[in-house]
Image (cartoon, rainbow, N blue to C red):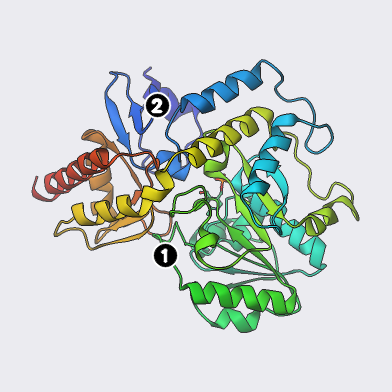
């Protein structure tokens, strides 16, 4: 049997049409197949590889840590230096009210922990979220996901969740003194990269402050430079009560985090104690890799080039079959008229050596979220291959 056949038989399948690209190794902005052919990775493992694949500094940090210890104890009991150093480094680049970091295994677990924290701290139950939002796939996270299609098979989910249209002012009156939290992304990625008005985010922030509702900002996909600053909220003039991180947080290793003020976070240690428990959250290898990745990001000028690279994609990707491009930094959705056309373009791109994908709530949009270290030459080459692929599937 081929590896592909084994994959389809023994690895649980959840996709109707898996991309089935077999990765041999990965470096920088390239995935290599078994013939050692490079494929330009335009999605970076879905917004994970901010500093590129297999960055030598990240690999070195993992190597150094793996000779010391792997898992030693469940989260929060013993002092694990990589966890301490990474939490401190994050605190250093975050505002004074985001200084207490709870490391988790994934973005979904960060969502779970944050919602529990909000309920515990406020002693309220009502939660507000938005249509077409994505905060993870576990049942709590699924409860706030904004899509009946993805939720219906798994009901009953969490009660007391109220959903609104992203960008609508109706939500402002719904935030009240019964509301534990509102959870939202500063840019709705899976909706096809929707960027809301800054004033709307600020109005939500203000309403939360007036009512004691905690604002949970999901930056799992937008943080670590992807939108041109370390965190998207820095460009919006707001500071959330709880920040969710994941994806690029681990530098390619699995990791999430929810971050809050210490006085909020401390409520997880009473009534009940151990308000959130995780065995592997904050694994020392992941923290070492994440810290190295953050240091690489801060010591390069990639973040400063994000807007310029975004503009280059816009000016180069012009084709009669492209209906538009929605973007926020290097998080971009190239819109086609249908999923069918988009999927054919994606498959053709893969044959032509460019790796990309679609979006959960915008299947007609092609996803671009390359490592931030992508060069302008590589962007031009990528665009050339995307345009060629569109030509091939529309004229071929
Ligand atoms: N929140 C957002 C905005 C995401 O994009 C994702 C993953 O795609 C998650 C949460 C869930 O993260 P994970 O897949 O690590 O559980």
Q: Which mark is residue 220?
A: none
Which structural element holds mark 2? strand
Which structural element holds mark 1? loop
Residue 311 lies left or right of residue 89; in this view the side is: left
Residues 108 and 238: in front is 238
Residue 212 lies left or right of residue 138; in this view the side is: right
Q: Quadrant of residue 184?
A: bottom right
- 325 to 44, vertically: above or below: below
- 351 to 136, vertically: above or below: above
Looking at the rendered structure, the number of numbered marks drawn on it comes to 2
The structure residue drawn at horizontal position 9% and vertical position 45%, both measured from the top left corner, is 396
Of marks 2 and 1, which one's residue comes earlier in the chain?
2
Q: Quadrant of the N terminus?
A: top left
Q: Quadrant of residue 9?
A: top left
Q: How far is the residue under mark 2 from the one under mark 1?
A: 30 Å
Horizontal and vertical percent position of residue 235: 50, 63
Residues 331 and 340: in front is 331
The structure residue drawn at horizontal position 52% and vertical position 76%, both measured from the top left corner, is 200
Horizontal and vertical percent position of residue 59: 52, 23
Horizontal and vertical percent position of residue 378: 26, 38
* Pointer 1 local density, CA inside 10 Å: few below 14, some 14–19, many at least 20: many
Whether residue 254 can be seen here:
yes
* Pointer 2 local density, CA inside 10 Å: few below 14, some 14–19, many at least 20: some
Q: Which residue in the structure is indicated by mark 2?
A: 26
- 186 to 384, vertically: above or below: below
Whether residue 133 can be seen here:
no
The structure residue drawn at horizontal position 27% and vertical position 23%, both measured from the top left corner, is 37
Horizontal and vertical percent position of residue 21: 34, 31
Q: Which residue in the structure is indicated by mark 1?
A: 194
Residue 386 lies left or right of residue 150; in this view the side is: left
């Amino acid at each position: 049997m081929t590896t592909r056949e084994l994959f389809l038989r023994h690895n649980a399948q959840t996709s109707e049409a898996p991309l089935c690209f077999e990765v041999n190794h990965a470096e920088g902005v390239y995935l290599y197949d078994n013939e050692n052919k490079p494929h330009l990775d335009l999605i970076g493992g879905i917004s994970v590889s901010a500093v590129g694949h297999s960055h030598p500094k990240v690999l070195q940090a993992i190597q150094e840590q793996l000779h010391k210890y792997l898992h030693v104890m469940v989260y929060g009991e013993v002092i694990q230096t990589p966890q301490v150093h990474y939490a401190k480094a994050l605190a250093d680049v975050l505002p004074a009210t985001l200084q207490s970091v709870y490391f988790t295994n994934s973005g979904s677990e960060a969502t779970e922990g944050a919602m529990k924290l909000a309920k515990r701290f406020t002693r309220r139950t009502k939660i507000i979220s938005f249509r077409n939002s994505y905060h993870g796939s576990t049942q709590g996270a699924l409860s706030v996901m904004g899509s009946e299609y993805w939720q219906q098979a798994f009901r009953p989910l969490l009660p007391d969740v109220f959903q609104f249209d992203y960008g609508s002012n109706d939500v402002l009156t719904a935030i009240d003194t019964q509301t534990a939290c509102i959870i939202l992304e500063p840019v709705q990625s899976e909706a096809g990269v929707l960027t809301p008005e800054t004033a709307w985010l600020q109005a939500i922030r203000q309403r939360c402050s007036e009512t004691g509702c905690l604002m949970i900002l999901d930056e799992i996909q937008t943080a670590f430079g992807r939108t041109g600053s370390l965190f998207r909220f820095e460009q919006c003039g707001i500071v959330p009560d709880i920040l969710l991180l994941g994806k690029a947080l681990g530098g390619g290793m699995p990791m999430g985090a929810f971050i809050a003020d210490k006085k909020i976070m401390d409520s997880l240690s009473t009534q009940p104690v151990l308000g959130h428990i995780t065995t592997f959250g904050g694994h020392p290898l992941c923290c070492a890799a994440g810290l190295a990745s953050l240091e690489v990001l801060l010591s390069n000028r990639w973040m400063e080039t994000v807007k310029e690279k975004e503009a280059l994609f816009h000016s180069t990707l012009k084709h009669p079959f492209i209906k538009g491009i929605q973007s926020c930094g290097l998080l971009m959705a190239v819109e086609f008229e249908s999923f069918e056309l988009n999927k054919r373009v994606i498959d053709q791109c893969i044959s032509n050596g460019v790796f990309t994908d679609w979006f959960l709530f915008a299947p007609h949009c092609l996803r671009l979220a390359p490592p931030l270290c992508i060069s302008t030459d590589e962007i031009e080459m990528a665009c050339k291959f995307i345009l060629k692929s569109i030509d091939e599937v529309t004229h071929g």
